[in-house]
Image (tube, rainbow, N blue to C red):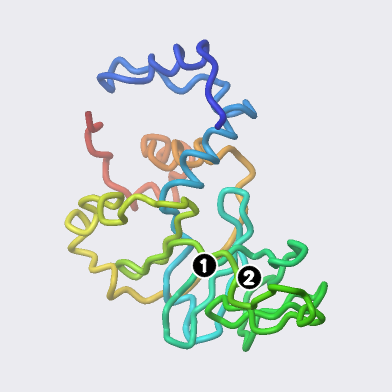
């Protein structure tokens, strides 16, 4: 497991405590490969990560290939209506199976034509019938934990993920007026932001730049930010 150097750990301690006395994150948090590796391991590969609104997967067989924490995934709705997330990696030679988004009757690797059902079961493995001890049931796609909640789809790459209810805390109560489960996606836009993910999150939460950067557009959309939480 990747760990932080003692020097960086000491710098990070200055970011803790009362908000008015905190330092911003040290520059290494935006440039260091060490920090990047720790973030991948502890945030994106252990916690629950949102992959979109659940109504993106409208019917059995609808799939989306994506990546979380550097891990290629395919999210597909099964014949039973359950949304599942699998490693987008064939169990034979680790080739990528699905690309893009669409509808599938089966998930088939184009390398050796190993074929998987929409619930991840291996249903076809050419020329493996004569291999001693080979059983299809032993080589289904690797599945990850997934939940549909408040209309969102979330996945965890952890082998033993923390209970989702514990992870999400009081979100439902806090956002009760918006009734997330009843919302319907009317428009979807996808774009890449060429910056460190923390920079994007920080700018989004620093509303006081709006009058200077967006005076004629979204400045009037947001109220003054709440006081910092301790």
Disc 2: CA contacts within 10 A as few (<14), some (14-19) or many (>=20): some
The residue at the point 52 percent across, 11 percent down is: 7
Tell me if 110 is positioned left or right of 53 in this view.
Answer: right
**Coordinates of residue 21 in the picture (x, y in percent):** 30, 15
Quadrant hosting residue 36: top right
**Coordinates of residue 134 in the picture (x, y in percent):** 69, 74
Q: Which mark is residue 85?
A: 1
In front of the other: 104 or 117: 117
Tell me if 94 is positioned left or right of 182 in this view.
Answer: right
Quadrant hosting residue 31: top right
The residue at the point 55 percent across, 84 percent down is: 61
**Coordinates of residue 154 in the picture (x, y in percent):** 42, 61
The residue at the point 28 percent across, 72 percent down is: 181
Q: Quadrant of the N terminus?
A: top right
In front of the other: 57 or 202: 57
Q: Disc 1 on helix, strand or loop?
A: strand
Q: CA distance from mark 2 to mark 1?
A: 16 Å
Disc 1: CA contacts within 10 A as few (<14), some (14-19) or many (>=20): many
In front of the other: 35 or 133: 133
Quadrant hosting residue 13: top left
Dot placed on the residue nearer the N-terminal end, 2 or 1:
1
Q: Which residue is mark 2?
A: 139
Q: How many marks?
A: 2
**Coordinates of residue 179 in the picture (x, y in percent):** 23, 68
Q: Is residue 162 above or below residue 151?
A: above
Tell me if 150 is positioned left or right of 134 in this view.
Answer: left
Q: Is residue 42 above or below residue 136?
A: above
Single out the mark in the foreground, 2 or 1. Answer: 2
Q: Which mark is residue 34?
A: none
């Amino acid at each position: 497991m990747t760990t932080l150097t003692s020097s960086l750990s000491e710098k990070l301690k200055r970011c803790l405590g009362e908000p008015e006395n905190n330092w911003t994150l040290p520059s290494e948090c935006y440039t260091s490969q060490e920090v990047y590796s720790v973030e991948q391991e502890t945030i994106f590969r252990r916690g629950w990560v949102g992959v979109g609104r659940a109504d993106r997967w409208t019917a059995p067989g609808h799939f989306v290939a994506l990546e979380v924490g550097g891990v290629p995934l395919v999210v597909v709705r099964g014949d039973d209506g359950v949304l599942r997330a699998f490693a987008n990696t064939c169990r034979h030679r680790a080739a990528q199976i699905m690309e893009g988004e669409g509808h599938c009757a089966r998930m088939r690797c184009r390398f050796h034509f190993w074929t998987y059902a929409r619930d991840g079961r291996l249903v076809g493995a050419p020329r493996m019938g004569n291999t001693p001890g080979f059983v299809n049931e032993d080589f289904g796609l690797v599945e990850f934990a997934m939940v549909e909640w408040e209309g969102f789809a979330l996945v965890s790459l952890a082998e033993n993920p923390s209970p989702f209810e514990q992870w999400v805390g009081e979100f439902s109560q806090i956002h009760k007026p918006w009734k997330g489960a009843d919302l319907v996606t009317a428009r979807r836009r996808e774009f890449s932001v060429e910056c460190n993910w923390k920079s994007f999150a920080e700018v989004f939460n620093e509303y006081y730049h709006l009058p200077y950067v967006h005076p004629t557009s979204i400045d009037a959309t947001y109220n003054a930010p709440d006081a910092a939480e301790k």
